Image (cartoon, coloured by chain):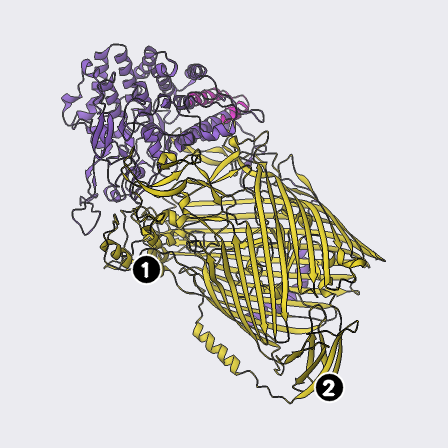
Chain colours: A yellow, B purple
Amino acid sequence: MTHSQINLARYLSHLRLLILLLPFIGFSQKQISGTVVDNQGMPIVGATVVEKGTSNGTTTDFDGNFDLEIAQDNSIVKISYVGFITKEVAAGSSSVLNITLETDTQSLEEVVVIGYGTQKREEVTTAIATVKSEDFNPGLVQDAGDLIKGKVAGLSISNGSGDPSATSNVSLRGVSTLQGNTQPLILINGLPGSLNSVAPNDIESIDVLKDASASAIYGTRGANGVILITTKSGKVNTKPTLSYSHYVSSSQFVRKADFLDAGDVRRLRADGIDLPQYNDLGYETDWLDEITRTAVTQNHNLTFSGGGDYSTYSVNANYMDQQGVFKKSFNEEFRIGADLTHSMYDGVLKFTASFLAGSQDIGALGDGASFDSRIYRQALIRNPTDRIYNDEGDYVQDGTVLQYVNPVSMIDLTDGDIQNDWVRLNGNITLEPVKGWVNNLFVGSNRNTNLRGFYEAKEYLGYNGDSRNGFASRYTAKSKTDLLEFTSKYSKTYDDHSFSVLGGYSYQYNVNESFYATNRDFPTNAFGYNNLGQGQGLQNGLASMGSGKDDNTLIGFFGRVSYSYKSRYNLLASIRREGSSKFGTNNKWGNFPAVSVGWNISREEFMENADFVNNLKLRAGYGETGIIPDASYLSQSLFSYSSRAYLNGEWIRGLTPDLQGGNPNPDLRWEVSREFNFGLDFGFFNNRINGSLDVYHKRTKDLLFDYSVPTPPNLVGVTKANVGEMQNQGFELLLNVNPVNTKDFSWDANITLSHNKNKLVSLSNDLYQIEGNYINYGTLSEPVSQITHRIEVGQPVSQFWGLKSVDVDFYEARDAFGEGNYWTIELPDGSRVPWDNALDTDENRQFLGNGIPAYNIGITNTFKYKSFDLSFVFTGALDFQILNAQRVFYEYPHIPYNVLNSAFDPVYGKDITLSNQIGQKFVSYYIEDGDYLKLNNVTLGYNFNTTNWDIIDALRLYVSGNNLAIITGYTGIDPEINRGSVLTQGTDDRDKYPSTRTFTLGLNVNF
Amino acid sequence: MLIFKSLIMKFIKDIKVCLLFFGLTAVSCTDLDETVYSSITAEGTTLTADDLDAIIVPPYASLRSIYWGWDGMFDVYEESSDLIVTPARVGIGWGQQYVNMHQHTWLSDLSHIEGLWSRTYSSINQINRAILQIEGLENNEATDVYLAELRAMRAMCYYILYDNYRNIPLVKRFDLPEGFLPEQSDNKEVYDFIVAELNEVMPLLSTDGLGSYGRFNQYAAKMTLAKMYLNSEVYIGESKWEEAMREVQDIIDSGEFSLTSEFSDVFALDNENLVETIFAIPYDNIEASGSYLAFKALYGKSRETFDLAGSPWGGSAGIPQFIDTYDEDDARLETTWLGGLQYSSSGAPILLDENDPDSQLNYTNYIKSVNEAGPTEGYRFIRYEIGAGVVATYGTDVPFYRYTDALMIKAECLLRLGRADEAASIVSEVRQRAFKDSDPSKAVMTGAELMEGSTYEYGKYEDGKITNYEGGDDIEYGRFLDELAWEFVGEHHRKQDLIRFGVYTTKSWFSHSPNGGFREIFPIPLSQMQTNSNLEQNPGY
């Protein structure tokens, strides 16, 4: 294992040494004074005047005057005030400084990345959120999603897993697809990728195209929004800078499920509580403890950049070594990114090349998976009075209980590794033969390889108590995406009119190849997965092998025009005509138009006297976007030789339909989303209050769904078809407030709030009909085996569907049930009946809540006091329910497995236990309100005074904590649950890799 | 660090080379054609006579999932009957669907009901497609035989559907217009189709019994016809005992089949090419495993008895009232059921708690109730030989139609035609294997005995006691029904037999009590009703 570990104590001692080595600062003092005014000569009250590189400073008084004692003559004085451009003045020999600050039009002039170009913030007419690197979340950051969690209204980012290799699950403006991809399109410097492709430290900014009028330029991939990640690049004529940052983190489970420990078992037995088939074996083992640890993460990042007159460069290297809380679970990543630009002939010709490479090594606890949830499950349910090893030193196993394996043996006796490597190359040539006419040729390639190995030792006992006498598998895959894009843009300004026209062509080719082999029955464990041929399984017909290849092509033509009158009236219109090889022969090409307008009210003449208004803009937009099916070839009739039959005395292979997604459908096409968006941007009081409000209405039709079709005439009972219709509407609010801003102390608050309401409008058309317009979905695994969700026309998706329990009562013996305590079930007509297995039918079930939060909130507060800064990030979700699956399975005392302590708590306030004849059942008792507010991150930083330091420009130390506190009524581990499945959200899986709480100590140095 | 630095330097130096590399090779501007690599496309493939075997493989392969797919044909015919139950076991689980099967409280979404329909129709679709493919071949003499074989198989699939759902759509072609939704044919139409189809293709089918092992030969077709006639009274209200007898007589007269000397041979691990097997669904441990019965029936610790490579899941068991009907000398009791104290393959007692010598695994002929069964309650079905080293599924062939079945059909027809003594001599012949090692005299049955009622003590069973005694005396030919149970338990017989003898929806057993005569046929599965508006639900549902 290349996976190295770090000793926290050693790290701390290094850090102490560094601080001791800091040069001592000596100074001679000098008194200066002055006045700060704006360009109209009006005094600026409360402007900050600081001696640069120190915390020494003051603020201007009511007349704009200040007095300051500075260290020495050559000190630089920095004057700043919100809404104005910060000015730096050399104190020199004069002791009086009269300073005029220019209004900061930068915040308005700021450019926003909009896809195939940029746009002035002021002229933006669509819903675009931008988060710059200085506003990113600090702390242990696993991927780009963590950086902007809670910062973009409407963008729901959840991880909910402590798995170090898990990436954030991102969705924008609710669920708008039943089956297609829900992840937004992620482009890194224009090339498709994932949140994990680029080191978080290498990211300059993240722009999120939220509404369809913004994302329609990306056609069939735009319906879930687009996340544009721009990496850092050098700047012309800047001196070389080098910065190094480092952090070390330690993580533990945020909460542990409260199962019985050995003491609990003995106490309960002593109290005479019946624990059937659950013997006190006389030992004490904390099983979860045995397979987990405090996980340590270290991260090193080095960036250097600079630029001359014609060229710039920027290179970022990042190394992260992250342990998982489960033993053998880890994620080690090395990522390097470089960006070079060169400009010739006075900027007529420009070249850009960027390069991103990464190598990731993940510990695999399962065959091809970073985590084997069964190990966790076994640790929870194993008898705490049992022991790990018997007297002979062998793992204690127990074959009498179904699917009951020693978890320590499961973790010890497997060895797995997943390696991902990626290289992303972009080249860009820009030719501007005439001022304003920019031609751009972009070529990029993204190559990913995956190599996995997994070995199960000879002694390993499988879930059925079976042994394969050594099992090894190898898997490798390679995927490649090549992208060529040509754009030509002409921009011109006549007096007050400015316009631009853009036309482009995009060609994207993706190819995937894979190979795998397995073998078993090995003579020794010595080879691990490194010598597959040594297994006897191949000779015995128990080895397997496979390979595959598929490809697809996406071609787009697009155009966009923008027009602006005095930046007051703005218009943007675009269209993309796009085709994909994945679509059926009858529907290869589609058009995706968009138009949006903006009225910059603050630029109107009548607003001139409204000084407190810095920005007021109304926006409206409409756009059509698409979602593409995941797999290739869904429209074709394919065959392979995969079935076998015994004919004429031998087993022969037959020509079998290759039905990956069901029956072939030549009419297959994209889902279409039509979205209206209305927005308001505002900035008041020198932008000390600013933000935006967006309201949207989005209707998706031709939803891709696996329709049940009658098996005659269809070959299989499923066809993927474009039928349904769904509606999402809601609002998003972003509010930035700067309530306090003095020399020593400032407070910035950033609040995002979003609300989404989802409704399934239709599931049928002429060809595909669903009787009753509903489909039950999602099942809890055996022995519960009950439906949990229903999607129904007129309802939102992810509705819980089941029996409503209202009480537990004693009932006399009934048909096949003895007397005992049973759930009291309230039927839809209001009548109350005792639990009966036969009750669990659609006639008696009801909607029991919804698993998708109606509201998401993010609150960031940043306080600065002299050299200290402190930030809090809260995230929360409101108005949704969670099915606590752990309780369903383990809050029932009559099972031969360990149970939750709460299994002995009163049920509906009654101190009784459920009859042992019911079995574990899903009823509404286990559905809880999921509302939560989570203290996602707290960071306390200290910026050193580096004025007199020769080598170091800036030095910052910080401590940070993630997932520190949760305010919630939810009794499970973490109400921020996995949100992978679209249709069955809200189920908190009993085996979820529990989320972690992390403490981080970090340092950033600029040289 | 040094490595890092040199890497960067090298990168900067190489950047010009890289830029050249970026140029893409020629791409076609708007070409969206798909290239398929790891499959073959229907359009791009021309089939020839050489592909005939490959074409008929999928239909044959699909029969395996009808039979041993989860909740497949085995379970459908046994779990709703008075022989086998899969109760909810304390500490183990097992779902509600098995309880519903037992208590006849199923709804149209029950997985047995959904599964049998979709799997059987899937086979019919595979057959229709194979027929279309063969019809599209260049003229070839061999194709007629293949087409006849496929049509006969399809008729058997329709017989399975007809037996369970009765009002079913007949889909006879694969190339149907888009949007085509099948309509149900009426009962008589389906009946006539199956009979006519089998008769029509009969002359073309193979008459080589052993040589066509695993393939649908003439005898398999005759067995299917015989089953249709045997149940004719139930199906169309018209008895056809003579016709049924005629079909099995042809099989008997062919001389291709005979009884094996040992009953257990039929279910041995290697039961291929047996003289007793008329039509087999072949399985193989490596090529096509599928039978999971041992794992569904045995308790985990029984792995030590059979040297299994994994621990079974412990569900299904024999209904105590049925086990009680066996004659203690009947060898079929022991070859079919595992009961009593259990020992490992080396003869050591199997202890549930290693420290407690009194904890020996003991399968009791007692089950508390369908909702509350202990893990070791009930005898376990082990008729199919369980091989060492098995995990979950294994590859014993299913003797779908066997010679004994033909004999017993003949016996039943004789009995019903008033020729009880002739029937008794056949039954005696069949019983010989069961009693040859214990008390051969017990094998002999008289016509009068066969005319008696059933020995099965019907009635509601609670906690080991029969509470509402119904008995079996009143069942006409009940004694013969018992014979069928002992001989054919676990061979997709019981549901059909109980219906034919009027017991299925009239008697109580274990935790089951009658729940409506309409339950003789299953409802049309919910998913089919939801997707095909032409379908009409069966009466009563």
Answer left or right for A231 relative to B425: right
Evaluate if marks 2 and 1 touch, with contact meaning CB atoms under 8 Å apart.
no
* For marks 2 and 1 on the same chain, the one whose residue lies earlier in the sequence: 2
- Rounded to the nearest whole Å, what is the CA distance between mark 2 and mark 1? 71 Å
**Image x and y of residue B214, in percent:** 37, 27
Nearer the camera: disc 2 or disc 1: 2
**Image x and y of residue B424, in percent:** 21, 15
Quadrant showing the N terminus of chain A: bottom left
Range covered by the magenta-colored residues: B129-155
- Residue occupying the point 25% across, 31% down: B319
Does residue A253 sit above or below B446 in this rendering?
below
**Image x and y of residue A850, in percent:** 50, 45
B340 within the magenta span: no
Q: Can residue A357 be seen in this view?
A: yes
Q: Can residue A168 be seen in this view?
A: no
Q: Type of residue at label 1?
A: Asp
B152 within the magenta span: yes
Chain to which mark 2 belongs = A
Chain to which mark 1 belongs = A
**Image x and y of residue A629, in percent:** 58, 42
Quadrant showing the C terminus of chain A: bottom right
Does residue B481 sit above or below A468 in this rendering?
above
Decide whether the magenta segment is chiefly helix, strand or loop.
helix
Secondary structure of the residue carrying numbered label 1: loop
Relative to the observer, which residue lies in front, A840 or B537?
A: A840
Q: Which quadrant of the figure has residue B425?
A: top left
Answer left or right for A217 relative to B429: right
Quickly name the residue at label 2: A95
Quickly name the residue at label 1: A286
Secondary structure of the residue carrying numbered label 2: loop
